[in-house]
Image (cartoon, rainbow, N blue to C red):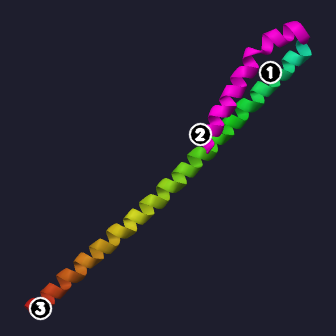
């Protein structure tokens, strides 16, 4: 979801920058300033989406590593139980 938003806000920012000078020429430089502010706003929102996406991905990676560590720990404890049972049977 954040990736699509990042792409959308990047495109909107680029469009605002592309029309900045034509809008300034035909409608006045106040309107061009508004286009510049919109471009900066869209760029800032894109960076916010990027930061949120990175935080979400790192959270998911941490959860996945925790699950894999638990699975590895349970398989090691199963192996230890099997070794202990075989040692007890040998005695």
Q: Position of residue 4 (x, y in %)?
A: 61, 38
Quadrant location of the C terminus?
Answer: bottom left
* Residue at the farthest left position: 90
Tell me where residue 90 sits by quadrant: bottom left
Q: Is label 2 or label 3 in front? A: 2
32 vs 13: above or below: above
Disc 3 crowd rating (10 Å Cα; few below 14, some 14-19, many 20+) is few
> Residue 76's mark?
none
- Answer left or right for 10 relative to 60: right
Q: Earlier in the sequence, mark 1 or mark 2?
A: 2
Q: Is label 1 or label 2 in front? A: 2
**Residue 24 covered by magenta stretch:** yes
SS under mark 1:
helix
Query: Residue shown at 91%/16% (left/top)?
Result: 30
Label 3 vs label 1: CA separation?
Answer: 79 Å
Tell me where residue 27 sits by quadrant: top right
- The residue identified by callout 3 is 89
Q: Earlier in the sequence, mark 2 or mark 3?
A: 2
SS under mark 2:
helix
Quadrant location of the N terminus?
Answer: top right
Q: Earlier in the sequence, mark 3 or mark 1?
A: 1
SS under mark 3:
helix
Disc 2 crowd rating (10 Å Cα; few below 14, some 14-19, many 20+) is few
- The residue identified by callout 1 is 36
- The residue identified by callout 2 is 3
The part of the chain drawn in magenta is 1-27
Disc 1 crowd rating (10 Å Cα; few below 14, some 14-19, many 20+) is some
Tell me where residue 76 sits by quadrant: bottom left
């Amino acid at each position: 979801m954040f990736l699509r938003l990042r792409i959308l806000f990047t495109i909107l920012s680029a469009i605002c920058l592309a029309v900045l000078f034509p809008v300034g020429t035909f409608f006045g430089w106040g309107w061009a300033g508004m286009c510049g502010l919109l471009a900066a706003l869209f760029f800032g929102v894109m960076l916010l989406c990027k930061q949120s996406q990175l935080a979400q991905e790192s959270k998911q990676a941490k959860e996945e590593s925790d699950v894999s560590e638990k699975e590895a720990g349970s398989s090691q404890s199963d192996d230890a139980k099997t070794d202990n049972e075989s040692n007890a049977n040998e005695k």
